[in-house]
């Protein structure tokens, strides 16, 4: 293992991206999200993603120097057209406007369109909670998941994330895929020749399977049966047609077997507790803290606790990257 | 069984409520939601609920002639104080303002406060989809459900509902509790002496149980493990402290073992496809139809299909009520 400081992680990510033609601004914000992934112990959203970025670029599926274009859609809606670039620069551009709109209107939405997407949503959610806002974000992906009772893959892994600001504490944040399991987990089981857990997937005939190859030929399932399936469908609609962007089947068609990062939209909704609560804001946010205190008394682990613990450690000690991954990334700089 | 027309159902409900002191207006809107429940084959949200209404009234836990008070909170937020009455009259009052705000701002929220709540959310969701709006509604309830990894009941059954308008068709609507199962289902198993399904509940020590009494002494579980638990927590926060209203533990404390309907708030969010999509609205709503067409090709049942089928039948043939329930309700008129 190789130990790197977070600054070194960020510099490596920026240099790789810039070398391959990503603009300075774009490289900086993508490096920021990858560094956040490494920092929080989420290696799958860390600099490992550089490999996917460069693959997506070489497949001609992302525009490295796209300049996002912002559009004031309505008093409570802002949209940013990513122009075929990655989602992060578009989010950065829309973020201050979303904050302003939420703070003046009470609730507001940011629609990111025409973006190539691989970013973890919690990075964006935490930027909003840091502004004292409550936030929800979601997006479709590629059609790998079948709805409850179906056999054809129609839904994406469709993540949803939520954040709630907590004064003087880490925010309450969750971020989960609505698929029963990550796509990568199925591929890992295939590589290791190990069976899947029941409830993860169906084969091409729609029958339950624990065989990784049959699952890849069939479809993954959502978490939580018909309820998770309904939620995933909601995400397709909200972060797809409602914002004028692709559903997961359309994104997959766009990919045309290139194996690139999905190309679609993202919806972020921000709520201003100040606007909702006026003079009562401090008292009611304190009541939320009473609610969280019950969780602590019952020894319930908060959704992002593992990430915040990893963060404390990484900020002091840096992060460890496997030698193989380090070499692979360094090769991208040659 | 006794067959009643929907008009008869509505008249019975109104008469019972008025006889017990509910105002004309309040009785009418509560009767409307109960009739919708019977019509759609959801007996648990039908006139059976009259028994609970009158119990709640006699326990002193609802104000039968409350006049909801509307407040313009922010350009995209309207709040209605139900003043201790049932939620339905407050929703009716806020509904046109929510529609106007969503249609002018793009996205808007309706906060209902200080209401006694037993209404199914899909009734409200369908009023919004009938206006061409996309909508989400959610509310806490009583603390009967433990978060993932916990043993104490801290969460409500916390329903969430979503609706998407479909031109010339029934809307796409789902409405589900985030608990693994309805509270009433556990009570039914207790009465019948049958075991619960695994995954529904834990005992007072936080250990999995299939014993109904141990479950009632312990806590129900959410659907979907840690993901369902996170979602339920989000609902507590959004439809609780964010709108200045009670969480499920606070609602339960307010009840103080009266066994009345929960007293808390409700949050409804409406999105205007016209505002989001402008000139593109028809084209993008048509893309949503393409997405739904895949579901039909794959023989996937839509979440509310059973309700819409029951509705067609009820509108022609009326509904059947058990003789026992009919007698019990008639007794409320004596």
Image: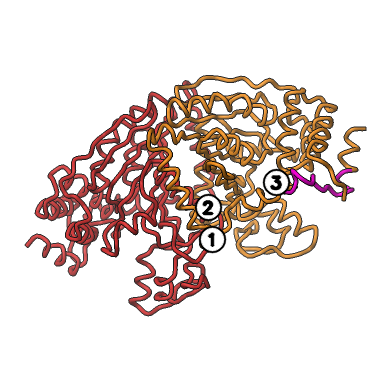
Chain colours: A orange, B red
Whether residue B305 can be seen here: no
Q: Which mark is residue B148?
A: 1
Residue placed most toward the observer, A271 or B301: A271
Range of the magenta residues? A312-326
| Front position in the image: A223 or B260 | B260
Subunit under mark 2: B
As measured in the structure, the alpha-carbon distance from the residue carrying label 1 to the one carrying label 3 is 23 Å
How many marks the image carries: the answer is 3
Dot 1 lies on which element? loop
Q: Position of residue B42 (x, y in %)?
A: 31, 57
Tag 3 residue = A311
Give above or below for B146 relative to B299.
below
Name the mark nearer the viewer: 2 or 3.
3
Query: Residue at coordinates 53% horizontally, 28% vertically from top-left?
Result: A99
Residues at discs 1 and 2 both on one chain: yes
Badge 1: how crowded within 10 Å, few (<14), some, or many (20+)? many
The Cα–Cα distance between marks 2 and 3, rounded to whole angstroms, is 21 Å
Q: Give yes or no for contact between labels 1 and 3 (Cβ–Cβ under 8 Å).
A: no
**Mark whose residue sits in front, 1 or 3:** 3
Rendering coords of residue A330 (x, y %): 89, 38
Instruction: Provide the residue designation for mark 2.
Output: B230
- Camera sees residue A268: yes
Task: Kindly state the secondary structure of the residue where label 2 is placed.
Answer: helix
Distance in Å between CA atoms under marks 1 and 2: 8 Å
Are the two marked residues, 1 and 2, in contact with CB atoms closer than 8 angstroms?
yes
Determine crowd level at label 2: few under 14, some 14-19, many 20+ residues with C-alpha closer than 10 A. many
Label 3 SS: helix
Left or right for B130, reference A121: left
Check if mark 2 and mark 3 are on a common chain. Answer: no
On the image, which quarter does residue B109 sit in?
top left
- Chain name for mark 1: B
């Amino acid at each position: 293992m190789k130990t790197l400081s977070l600054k070194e992680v960020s510099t490596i990510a920026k240099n790789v991206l810039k070398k391959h033609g990503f603009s300075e601004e774009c490289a900086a914000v993508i490096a920021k999200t990858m560094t956040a992934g490494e920092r929080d112990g989420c290696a799958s959203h860390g600099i490992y993603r550089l490999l996917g970025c460069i693959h997506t670029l070489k497949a001609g599926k992302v525009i490295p120097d796209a300049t996002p274009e912002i559009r004031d859609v309505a008093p409570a809606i802002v949209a940013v057209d990513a122009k075929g670039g990655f989602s992060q620069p578009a989010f950065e551009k829309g973020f201050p406007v979303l904050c302003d709109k939420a703070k003046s209107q009470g609730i507001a939405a940011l629609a990111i369109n025409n973006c190539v997407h691989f970013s973890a949503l919690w990075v964006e959610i935490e930027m909003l909670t840091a502004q004292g806002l409550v936030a929800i974000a979601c997006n479709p992906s590629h059609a790998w998941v079948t709805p409850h009772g179906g056999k054809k893959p129609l839904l994406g892994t469709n993540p949803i994330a939520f954040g709630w600001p907590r004064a003087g504490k880490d925010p309450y944040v969750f971020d989960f895929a609505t698929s029963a399991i990550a796509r990568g987990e199925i591929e890992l089981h295939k590589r290791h020749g190990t069976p899947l857990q029941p409830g993860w997937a169906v084969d091409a005939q729609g029958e339950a399977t624990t065989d990784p190859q049959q699952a890849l030929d069939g479809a993954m399932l959502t978490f939580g049966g018909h309820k998770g399936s309904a939620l995933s469908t909601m995400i397709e609609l909200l972060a797809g047609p409602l914002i004028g962007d692709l559903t997961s089947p359309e994104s997959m068609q766009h990919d045309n077997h290139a194996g690139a990062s999905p190309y679609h939209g993202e919806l972020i909704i921000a709520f201003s507790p100040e606007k909702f609560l006026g003079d009562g804001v401090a008292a009611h946010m304190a009541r939320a803290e009473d609610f969280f205190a019950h969780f602590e008394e019952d020894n319930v682990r908060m959704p992002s606790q593992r990430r915040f613990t990893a963060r404390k450690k990484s900020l002091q000690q840096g992060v460890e990257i496997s030698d193989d991954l380090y070499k692979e990334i360094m090769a991208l700089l040659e």
